[in-house]
Image: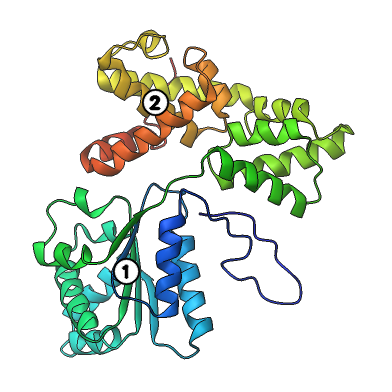
Amino acid sequence: MPDARDQKPDRPPHPWDGFLVGEENALAHAGVIALARGDAAGVSPLIVHGPSGSGKTRLLEGLVAERIARKPGAAVAHLTAERFAALCAEAAGTRAGFGDLRERFRALELFVLDDLHALENAPLALSELAHTLDALDQAGAAVAASARMGPARWSGWPARLVSRLVGGLSARVDTPGPASRRRYVLERSRSRGLRLSAEAVETLAAQGEDFRTLDGLLARIGLAGKVEHRALDGSLAEDVLAEGGDGASGNSARSAERIARAVAEKFGVNLRDLRSASRRQALVVPRHLAMHLVRRGTTLSFAAIGAFFGKRDAATIRHACRVAAERLAADPALAAEIAAIERPGATRSG
């Protein structure tokens, strides 16, 4: 889970600096530490899965750094699945390619792969990965990987590969809950020298979706406090949130309407109904997707998006965004259609 990194001048930053362990990532973190110690039995392959922004890559970075710190000179490889697929494609085009590739990856002590789902359309890489995992398992090496969803939801993958990947620990990580966001705001504001009131801390923890968002809000609150000579309290936090990120709340509101209108047209529903309080099933999916796209494509806060969609509260918008993100991760066809809406020029004002 990403979080505050209080970098000290007397040493390089470490991936675990300021790392927050909470209920959202405790199991994955425990698995990472076990692999870093060399305790692979029952843990490897470790599959860390969850939505974007939940800190999967940060956990894998910490695993690699911790393993090297505990065992300098260890044979470790950490790369994205996309890079692995590219290496397999390159190897297929040379006479000695696969021999070199296998010598490189099958002699490792720890193999770490980011974003397994990048291999979905790379059958050659999927096959090679299955053989690589077989060889690493026989050698007693450890494997860890991140994925957008858990193994139970993989479909169309080689059975041999899936069987190998599910032989260890599958640990879900989620974006931070209220307690973790509150801890983050407290620690990060302290490291920035911001003395936030308890009210401001609660306001930020309630509105921020993830640590990246909270960092941006903290930076803006600190700047606004200095420029306007105001106390860093809940009132200032509310004002900063109401600005919609960069002060261009009018532009963001217009963008939100264009996005919502495009989604409504895509699903054949009325924009007015999409923004209404109606809970008809035909409106739920497009409304969730529209909220998610507005959050991703504008600088509006959860509170502002809630106001746009029928005066809903921030918690409702946050939930809708998470549900929509999971739906898109599980449905590539729908994700492709939604991506078309997000492309410049895909939405039109009306």
Residue 322 is situated, as x and y percent measured from the top left of the image, at: 40, 36
Residue 213 is situated, as x and y percent measured from the top left of the image, at: 58, 42
Q: Is residue 215 among the parts visible in the rendering?
A: no
Q: Is residue 113 above or below residue 254?
A: below
Circles 2, 1 touching at the beta carbon (< 8 Å): no
Residue 242 is situated, as x and y percent measured from the top left of the image, at: 66, 24
Query: What's the amino acid at mark 2?
Result: Ala
Q: Quadrant of the C terminus?
A: top left
Q: Is residue 184 above or below residue 349?
A: below
Residue 221 is situated, as x and y percent measured from the top left of the image, at: 75, 38
Query: What's the amino acid at mark 1?
Result: Val
Q: CA distance from mark 2 to mark 1?
A: 39 Å
- From the viewer's side, name the closer residue of 216 and 19: 19
Residue in the image at 24% along x and 77% along y: 90
- Residue 329 is drawn in which quadrant? top left
Q: Of label 2 and label 1, which has the lower sequence position? A: 1
Q: Which mark is residue 43?
A: 1
Q: Dot 2 lies on which element?
A: helix
Mark 2, residue position: 290
- Residue 262 is drawn in which quadrant? top left
Q: Is residue 322 above or below residue 135?
A: above
- Left or right for 26, reference 6: left
Q: Is residue 188 above or below residue 16?
A: above
Q: Which mark is residue 226?
A: none
Q: Badge 2: how crowded within 10 Å, few (<14), some, or many (20+)?
A: many
Q: Badge 1: how crowded within 10 Å, few (<14), some, or many (20+)?
A: many
